[in-house]
């Protein structure tokens, strides 16, 4: 299977890195093109990919094409590739934020083209990401399974409705920054009590990593897991109560609310 990337920005490169690390996809079976030859040729050389001279040729030669350009560039790209998509029925997978399946079909001028929207987060580079996916009615079960199999190599995959993509963006796309902030806050608390910053950061990050793995592997809810760590009259309970008094849960919810509100505002522009 040949996989094409139109656009080689940060997200595309994160996905490419993750796919190569799996060693399940030959790097030369990944085709790349972008607006600037010096950029996509450099990326192709760095990861031993196959550079393609233009977008239409890439669509003609790939089985699945990831459209990984900024939303405002999408109309131009689809104008260039419409004939190739129509001739080859290549599966289009859009990574462009805010563009609905209907809008993509309208811009490419084909209502019968199989199109999927996805939203990965940056952790796909380490095969620890989470990607939302939704397809239009032209996407067969086989094609959906094929795309999900590729995305599963990069971490978790969740099928959700288009209306939920904004919420997903907040919970998965923006949240790595929130988690980094939490890890840094814990590390600074460690420094306050005598640890060196690098050691405190490693301890905090590993604790978050292991705790996240426990959530994913357990049938218990996160709150049940909280109870399992909390002994009556113990240190953990004291810490939890202090965090709640300071408004930790409220702050997190408000952060997600603000992220969703900003995303909706941007979509209306």
Image: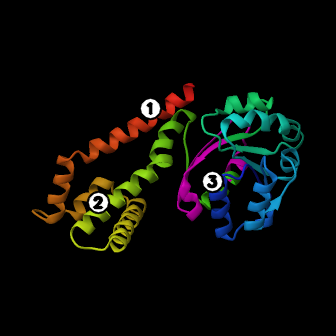
* Residue ID at (72%, 39%): 115
Q: Which residues are magenta?
A: 117-145
Inter-mark Cα distance, 1 to 2 = 31 Å
Residue behind mark 3: 10
* Residue ID at (38%, 69%): 206
Residue 26 in the image: x percent, y percent?
76, 68
Q: Nearer the viewer, residue 129 or 9?
A: 9
Q: Secondary structure at mark 1?
A: helix
Inter-mark Cα distance, 1 to 3 = 24 Å
Image position of 235 (left or right of 50)? left
Q: Quadrant of residue 52?
A: bottom right
Q: Is residue 268 above or below residue 215?
A: above
Q: Quadrant of residue 3?
A: bottom right
Going by the picture, which residue comes out furthest to the front? Answer: 38
Residue behind mark 1: 261
Q: Of the residues under marks 1 and 3, which one precedes in the sequence?
A: 3
Q: Can you say which quadrant of the picture contains the C terminus? A: top right
> Is residue 1 visible to us here?
no
Residue behind mark 2: 225
């Amino acid at each position: 299977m040949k996989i094409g990337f139109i656009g080689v920005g940060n997200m595309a490169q994160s996905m490419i890195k993750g796919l190569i690390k799996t060693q399940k996809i030959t790097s030369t079976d990944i085709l790349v093109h972008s607006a600037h030859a010096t950029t996509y040729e450099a990326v192709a050389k760095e990861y031993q990919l196959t550079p393609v001279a233009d977008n239409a040729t890439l669509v003609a030669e790939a089985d699945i094409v990831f459209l990984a350009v900024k939303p405002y560039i999408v109309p131009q790209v689809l104008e260039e590739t419409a004939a190739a998509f129509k001739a080859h029925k290549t599966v289009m997978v859009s990574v462009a934020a805010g563009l609905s399946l209907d809008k993509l079909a309208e811009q490419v001028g084909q209502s019968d083209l199989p199109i999927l929207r996805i939203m990965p987060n940056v952790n796909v580079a380490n095969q620890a990401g989470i990607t939302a996916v939704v397809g239009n009615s032209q996407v067969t079960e086989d094609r959906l399974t094929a795309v999900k199999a590729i995305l599963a190599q990069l971490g978790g995959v969740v099928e959700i409705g288009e209306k939920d993509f904004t919420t997903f963006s907040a919970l998965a796309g923006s949240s790595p920054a929130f988690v980094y902030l939490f890890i840094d806050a814990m590390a600074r608390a460690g420094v306050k009590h005598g640890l060196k910053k690098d050691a405190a950061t490693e301890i905090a990050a590993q604790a978050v990593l292991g705790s996240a793995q426990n959530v994913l592997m357990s049938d218990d809810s996160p709150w049940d897991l909280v109870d399992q760590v909390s002994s009556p009259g113990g240190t953990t309970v004291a810490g939890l109560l202090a965090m709640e008094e300071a408004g930790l849960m409220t702050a997190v919810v408000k952060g997600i609310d603000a992220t969703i509100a900003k995303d909706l505002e941007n979509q209306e522009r």
